Image: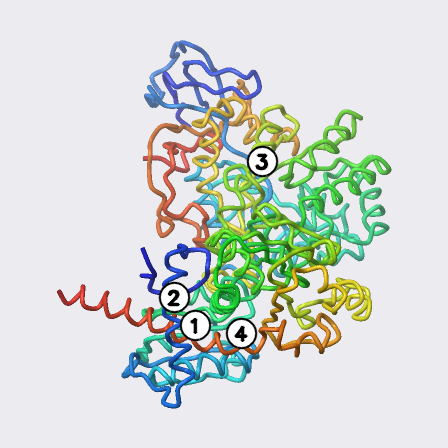
Amino acid sequence: MKSILLQNAMLIDPEAGTEEIGSLLIKDTKICEIGAKISLASNEVEIIDCTGKYLAPGIIDIGVKVCEPGERHKESFKSAGLAAASGGITTIVTRPDTLPAIDTPETLEFTRRRANETAPINVLSMAALTKGRQGREMTEIGFLLDAGAVGFTDCDSVISDTKVLSRALSYARSLGALVMGHPQEPTLSKGAAATSGKLASLRGLPSVSSIAERMGLDRDIALVEMTGVRYHFDQITTSRALPSLRRAKNKGLDITAGTSIHHLTLNEFDLADYRTFFKVKPPLRSEDDRLSVVAALKEGLIDIISSMHTPQDEESKRLPFEEAASGAVGLETLLPAALRLYHSGHLNLPTLFRALSFNPASRIGLPCGRLIAGAPADLVIFDPHVPFLLDRSKLKSKSKNTPFDGARMQGKVIWTFVGGRAVFGP
Amino acid sequence: MGFYDKNLLGIEPLSPAAISEILDLADSYVELNRRSNKHSNVLAGLTQINMFFENSTRTQASFEIAGKRLGADVMNMEMQASSIKKGETLIDTALTLNAMHPDLLVVRHPQSGAVDLLAQKVNCSVLNAGDGRHEHPTQALLDALTIRRAKRRLHRLSIAICGDIAHSRVARSNIILLGKMENRIRLIGPPTLMPSGIAELGCEVYENMCEGLHDVDVVMMLRLQRERMDGGFIPSEREYYHRYGLDAEKLSFAKDNAIVMHPGPMNRGVEIDGEIADDINRSVIQEQVEMGVAVRMAAMDLLARNRRQTYQEVIA
């Protein structure tokens, strides 16, 4: 395989927290050398001039829903893979909330096979923590780990039986498995389509107090303390949850936290016109909450940004707000939306890529997500300044339910490399 | 400034001038409705369809009479019984109706925002006859007209809205309308029936009814919406009546000439004492029904005028 030299790029190193101009040499599937000037030993090198462009470790997106098995018309591994590649995402970690749920080694093997056959990027899978995501009996965590599951989660269906959850967590701990939970008090948030407050009251939407997130978080933290399991909260979205999270981390529990790109860049006022593309779970929060979550991300209290990619077809969204399905697609808009936080001056690029690439890779235990010699050449080259209007009909995802339809965005992916091979480029 | 919109979906987008314009025209229709020949032909040739996705006798009858008195061809569609049961979506229903070229669509729907959704998909004028817990603009307008005729003004009044505010679209539309007209609004009810963040709209919130009613000019009672409750909001109807039902004793805290209103249908002995509801010196509940027809005639008349205006502009 030919070597590729990416020359004169602005190299963003999330691990060191630096951004400086330099070059990067890819040999085979790995990063071979990084430096201000790289002297070439042979002529067998393809040179790509990246002057004025930015180079960062490819994004690792935890919590992507690909609708195989069950609803391939909404999203397949192929369409999700193409969408991810064009969004600068080099690894997706899929959710098990499919039809049927991925809760046996057999269904997991099916998705692993489908993914390897069709997706141009790395696909890793999570499995359900309980059978059928019903919250009653734990899945075969050991077998599922052997079959390649990198994490266990029931997604947004919260296990309300604490005894079931505590047993599943103890068992997962004994195998060193990572468990991902959705912090939410399920009875309080039942039927909610918005966050309690003036806007939800004016629009007459059923709503849930932001305290429900803290209640779910507090319970799960107590169980982590009891069982010692490795635990990741998929989405922390309110300021009220942050003190509990801080205490738990200070105590030294093996906890990490994520948030979704939508909660970082949108707020409850986007629901004012009853646009169902803005209906996500948990519902969009107040502007105060959004700013607190951005600050927590900057500080490192929140570790990971995910797209929480949830494809929905037109039929499930063209309904009155309460009846419409939750979720938004996000693979292709993750980077440009995240760059809003850079352009607004909230975060610098190394901090952003720490949450997009380095931290998720470390949490899953992957060698990617960093710019060092020997790491896999999973890279994204982008220009953060190119402006564009998002047209949802141009998305590569099979489902077009993006809340950013018609939005002004800034930042475009130019190249995406996975294992040293260009999977997206001009 | 006035009412130039294509649709009447809520009070929120209306200016005070637009509200006054509708009320002024409604005043003239009150006179027409009291004559023996009640017929006008301002809507002659226009088709009005009433689509009620939720049970209603009173509002539907009011809209039907209003349309007929103005000479429109009125049709009622019982939506619960029809295609919705066959799995047709709201948008498909809207598109089907749109192809029949109606001019006015009067819609009630159990879900907030559903009427807005429907209005985006059709060409005709849409009038919201109540959507979920969101808005019920003609109810707020008829309440305003009733107050204006009883009190001779619609500003600087102290108005108490009492009871099940959380489930009430009537309360929301009234809070917005009366706030726009610069009145002092008090909301009275148990905290379980009070929507969150409502004080941010400039209302005073009371949990004690006697305190809340102190010196008010208008007492607006709301129906306890038992059908919208999935349990556990109040301990029992008798305790609710004891603490929040309007009786003579609680009413004595209001001004001596305070009027009592209720959007109907009433639960006598739950939120209001039967004798007060029937007291012709205090209760304006029958007037509210009368004003309802007049306000709906005015709203439909203005919507039709706005349509003709737009149509002529297109021709020109």
What residue is drawn where x is 47% and y is 69%? B138
Q: Nearer the viewer, mark 4 or mark 3?
A: 4
The quarter holding residue A286 reads top right
Q: CA distance from mark 1 to mark 3?
A: 41 Å
The quarter holding residue A292 reads top right
**Circle on res. B22:** 2
Q: CA distance from mark 2 to mark 4?
A: 16 Å
In this rendering, position of residue A392 left or right of residue A204? left
Looking at marks 2 and 1 on the same chain, the residue that comes earlier in the sequence is marked by: 2
Q: Are marks 2 and 4 on the same chain?
A: yes
Amino acid type shown at disc 3:
Asp
Amino acid type shown at disc 4:
Gln
Find numbered disc 4 in the image and state the secondary structure of the residue it sits on: helix
User: Is the residue marked by circle 4 packed among few (<14), some (14-19), or many (20+) residues within 10 Å?
Assistant: many
Q: CA distance from mark 2 to mark 1?
A: 7 Å
Establish if A280 lies above or below B163: above
Let me know if residue B154 appears in the view.
yes
Amino acid type shown at disc 1:
Val
What residue is drawn where x is 80% and y is 57%? A136
User: Is the residue marked by circle 3 packed among few (<14), some (14-19), or many (20+) residues within 10 Å?
Assistant: few
Q: Give the chain letter at badge 4.
A: B
From the top left corner, tell me how far across and down residue A62 is, in percent. Answer: 59, 40
**Circle on res. A288:** 3
**Circle on res. B288:** 4
Q: Are marks 1 and 3 on the same chain?
A: no
